Image (cartoon, rainbow, N blue to C red):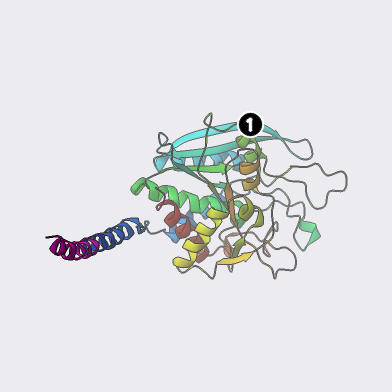
């Protein structure tokens, strides 16, 4: 009996090992299948629609704070967000410009699924610059900038995203924020003592006084100058230092979608923009998708930046599409 038992035991042991091994393999396969990321296809971003929203803003004229065009455009933007099903907040504030001018400012916020704790914020500035101080013709330096790219393009992309969200909502809550008084910073022609933080006044105010007490989002995506012909978007260094995971997520998604000609996976120049204050004051990591042109002699932001030529003739629907579709695919894959 003992000899027989001793003989049978190794056989049984081998059988059991085989069963366990097979079971482990199946479990591993199932786990890998479960853990494999399911990619959600976002709705198709309509570039022609976004282009129309950019043009609608420029039709009001330059959106300089304290002007009638600014007031009219603000009403238009708030009404569009409301039309697209957002809960709209209007944040009015008197902000002091570099020269002491009181700017009657208005941040406009559209919230989707406001009850959700899982949130991502998308933002752009909607005002335009009062000085074309980078224009090659010095006679134009005191002329206002139309701001088709610098301001209206980012807002146009976000309005199209808002329209799409109304049709099919992502799983998480989305806040679309139009910051005011971003582009009223100290002009290049000013001679005297430069004060700090004269740019991005609306986002500075919002970061200190969010539209909802205790507001927080996982991260933010800022769009600035995202409609120009031949635009390229390099990784902005402040964004990469403070929100590296989100930068990688966006640039990888852009390349996955075939927009690698626009989204260059290299470092660009560091800029002071709304995302800096969203992070440094509001404590929300925020990345900046912003045009960077390393070959432009007058400005790394491109040839129309802060000139009288920042008009609709220089807006490209293909650029709007590359940015808008990338952002949509990112937010629709958030859980």
Residue 195 placement, left or right of 161? right
Above-or-below relation of 283 to 155:
above
Point 53% across, 46% down: residue: 219
Residue nearest the viewer, comparing 15 with 269: 15
Magenta: predominant secondary structure element? helix
Examine the rendering and report whether any part of residue 67 can be seen.
Answer: no
Residue 309 placement, left or right of 117? right
Residue nearest the viewer, comparing 59 with 239: 239
Residue 231 placement, left or right of 269? left
Spot the residue most to the right: 192
Point 62% across, 40% down: residue: 203
Residue 191 placement, left or right of 171? right
Image coords of residue 34 (percent x, y): 31, 56
Q: Is residue 127 magenta?
A: no
Image coords of residue 162 (percent x, y): 43, 47
The segment highlighted magenta reads 1-17
SS class, disc 1: strand
Which of the image's four quarters has the N terminus?
bottom left
Point 21% across, 64% down: residue: 10
Quadrant of the image occupied by residue 72:
top right
Residue nearest the viewer, comparing 49 with 172: 172
Please name the residue that numbered disc 1 is placed on. Answer: 93
Spot the residue most to the left: 1
**Dot 1: few (<14), some (14–19), or many (≥20) neighbours within 10 Å?**
some
Count of residue discs: 1
Image coords of residue 223 (percent x, y): 56, 53
Examine the rendering and report whether any part of residue 74 can be seen.
Answer: yes
Spot the residue most to the top: 213
Point 49% across, 50% down: residue: 158
Image coords of residue 6 (percent x, y): 18, 62
């Amino acid at each position: 009996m003992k000899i027989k038992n001793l003989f049978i035991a190794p056989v049984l042991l081998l059988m059991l090992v085989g069963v366990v091994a097979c079971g482990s393999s199946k479990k591993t396969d199932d786990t890998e299948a479960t853990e494999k990321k399911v990619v959600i296809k976002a709705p198709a971003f309509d570039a022609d629609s976004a282009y129309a929203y950019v043009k609608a803003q420029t039709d009001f004229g330059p959106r300089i704070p304290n002007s009638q065009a600014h007031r009219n455009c603000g009403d238009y933007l708030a009404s569009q967000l409301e039309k697209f099903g957002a809960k709209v907040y209007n944040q009015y504030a008197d902000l002091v410009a570099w020269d002491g001018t009181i700017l009657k400012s208005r941040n406009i916020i559209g919230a989707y699924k406001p009850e959700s704790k899982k949130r991502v914020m998308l933002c752009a500035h909607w005002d335009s610059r009062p000085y074309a101080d980078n224009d090659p013709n010095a006679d134009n330096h005191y002329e206002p900038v139309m701001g088709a790219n610098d301001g209206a393009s980012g807002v146009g992309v976000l309005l199209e995203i808002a329209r799409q969200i109304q049709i099919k909502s992502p799983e998480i809550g989305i806040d679309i924020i139009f910051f005011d008084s971003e582009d009223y910073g100290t002009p290049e022609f000013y001679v005297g003592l430069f004060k700090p933080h004269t740019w991005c006044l609306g986002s500075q105010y919002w970061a200190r006084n969010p539209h909802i007490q205790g507001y927080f989002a996982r991260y933010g995506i800022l769009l600035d100058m995202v409609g120009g012909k031949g635009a390229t978007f390099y990784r902005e260094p402040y964004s990469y230092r403070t929100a590296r995971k989100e930068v990688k997520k966006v640039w990888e998604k852009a390349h996955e979608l075939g927009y690698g000609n626009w989204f260059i996976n290299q470092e660009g120049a560091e800029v002071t923009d709304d995302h800096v204050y969203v992070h440094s004051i509001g404590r929300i990591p925020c990345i900046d998708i912003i045009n960077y042109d390393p070959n432009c002699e007058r400005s790394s932001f491109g040839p129309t930046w802060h000139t009288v030529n920042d008009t609709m003739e220089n807006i490209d629907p293909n650029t709007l599409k590359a940015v808008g579709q990338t952002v949509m695919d990112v937010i629709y894959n958030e859980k």
